[in-house]
């Protein structure tokens, strides 16, 4: 049946179902993105040492995941896609778990590239379908504020996978077993989502998202998409290589497990915190502020090679990247003149392009120059430019309409 089938005789979700949907979104984001996408960061240093991979190869593996993410976003946006969004979401969660575990069952670069590509595609499906379903469910129930819980899943997944990896490394486990265990954790999350996510579809009514773009909506959305793509490039270099940066410095190597846990713990409440700022300053202005804060964190990771510097990087980047993601997606839905799912997919495509370019660029430059300093400076500059474009997008729209709460 078509993806958008919404029987008119179904009633909106109850409060209990809305809360269940929010937790389903949290677990889905934790499993496919917090674990499926980001567990590569704490495992990567062990793979580099055990397999003798170059930083360029490491960046290529990361970019394969984000290329899959881009392709997945394009496929998820196809108007002729058959089947319910719930089924696509659950299927993508299963694929994410299997591809994650599969990383521990091979040792050659081509297999790594294929598995991360597949996992990236699955994570795009999860992000788009989980966000579209959960945000619509919550709006139907008048509980949009619970979307902060949905977006908190990524940080919780990052922290959970960091604890898992640290505990297994303390036991002397190999990098292969880290991948298999992470896949098992993701699979458990997928099963939980199946139990938590309401199986019924709410009626097709307004979700409460208002297009405040007016006659300038198209221009504003284009600028917003560009800013979002620069954000994808700007954050991903630090998010991919932060643990490798820490491990490469003997003075702070012992902090390796704690850095990624700090990254995840900073991410978990970040959407709530940035929503509080957005309620006062508006989404575009808050996006710009968060992008500047993130740029400081990116630069701190290489400009201040000390415990204070890398913890600052973990907290500032971890504490902004999901806030920026949520702010970007919510504002895109507000600016959309048609199907909000298409706007989300367009944003995901721009984000994916930034993420594909970032790791390959950083790995290649790092191999040539011996450090991640130059790539991080470029990334910080991209984030500052994203802040400028976000403000321009705000100016391009006609005033009117309230900002939606994240």
Image: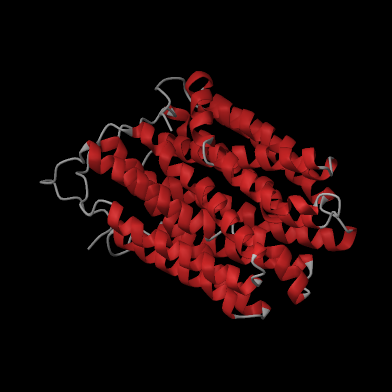
Q: Position of residue 143 (x, y in %)?
A: 31, 33
Q: Which image quadrant for residue 174?
A: bottom right
Which image quarter holds the N terminus?
bottom left
Q: Nearer the viewer, residue 178 or 24?
A: 178
Q: Residue at x 36, y 59 (%)?
A: 89
Relative to residue 6, is residue 186 drawn left or right? Answer: right
Looking at the picture, does residue 366 appear above or below residue 227?
Answer: below
Q: Position of residue 101 (x, y in %)?
A: 52, 72
Q: Is residue 396 visible?
A: yes
Q: Is residue 350 visible?
A: no
Q: Which image quadrant for residue 330?
A: top left
Residue, far left: 9
Q: Residue at x 71, y 70 (%)?
A: 47
Which image quarter holds the C terminus?
top left
Q: Residue at x 78, y 47 (%)?
A: 376
Relative to residue 114, is residue 317 drawn left or right? Answer: right
Q: Position of residue 226 (x, y in %)?
A: 60, 42
Relative to residue 24, is residue 64 drawn left or right? Answer: right
Q: Residue at x 42, y 27 (%)?
A: 212
Q: How many marks?
A: 0
Q: Position of residue 235 (x, y in %)?
A: 66, 46
Residue, far right: 369
Q: Nearer the viewer, residue 129 or 107?
A: 107
Q: Nearer the viewer, residue 191 or 76?
A: 191
Q: Nearer the viewer, residue 371 or 132?
A: 371
Which color scheme does this rendered protein use?
A: secondary structure
């Amino acid at each position: 049946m078509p993806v958008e089938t919404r029987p008119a005789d179904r009633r909106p979700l109850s409060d209990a179902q809305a809360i269940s949907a929010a937790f389903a979104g949290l677990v889905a984001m934790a499993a496919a993105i917090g674990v499926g996408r980001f567990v590569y960061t704490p495992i990567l240093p062990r793979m580099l040492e055990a397999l003798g991979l170059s930083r360029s190869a490491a960046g290529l593996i990361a970019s394969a995941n984000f290329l899959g993410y881009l392709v997945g976003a394009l496929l998820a946006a196809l108007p002729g896609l058959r089947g319910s969004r719930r089924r696509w979401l659950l299927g993508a969660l299963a694929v994410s778990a299997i591809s994650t575990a599969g990383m521990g069952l091979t040792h050659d670069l081509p297999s790594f590239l294929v598995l991360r590509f597949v996992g990236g595609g699955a994570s795009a499906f999860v992000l788009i379908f989980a966000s579209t379903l959960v945000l619509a469910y919550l709006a139907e129930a008048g509980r949009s504020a619970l979307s902060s819980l949905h977006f908190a899943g990524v940080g919780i997944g990052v922290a959970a996978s960091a604890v898992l990896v640290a505990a297994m490394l303390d036991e002397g486990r190999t990098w292969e077993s880290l991948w298999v265990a992470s896949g098992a954790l993701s699979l458990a999350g997928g099963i939980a989502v199946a139990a938590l996510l309401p199986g019924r579809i709410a009626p097709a009514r307004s979700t409460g998202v208002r297009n405040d773009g007016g006659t300038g909506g198209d221009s504003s959305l284009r600028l917003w998409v560009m800013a979002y793509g620069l954000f994808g490039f700007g954050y991903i270099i630090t998010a991919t290589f932060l643990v490798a940066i820490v491990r490469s410095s003997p003075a702070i190597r012992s902090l390796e497990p704690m850095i990624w846990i700090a990254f995840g713990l900073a991410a978990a409440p970040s959407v709530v915190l940035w929503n509080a700022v957005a309620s006062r300053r508006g989404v575009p202005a808050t996006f710009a502020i968060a992008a500047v804060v993130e740029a400081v964190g990116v630069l701190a990771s290489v400009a201040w090679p000390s415990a204070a510097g890398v913890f600052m990087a973990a907290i500032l980047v971890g504490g902004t990247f999901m806030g920026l993601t949520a702010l970007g997606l919510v504002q895109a839905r507000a600016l959309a003149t048609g199907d909000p799912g298409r706007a989300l997919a367009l944003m995901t495509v721009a984000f994916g392009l930034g993420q594909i370019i970032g790791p390959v660029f950083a790995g290649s430059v790092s191999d040539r120059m011996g450090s991640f300093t130059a790539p991080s400076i470029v990334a910080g500059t991209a984030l500052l430019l994203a802040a400028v474009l976000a403000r321009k997008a705000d100016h391009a729209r006609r005033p009117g309409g309230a900002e939606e709460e994240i």
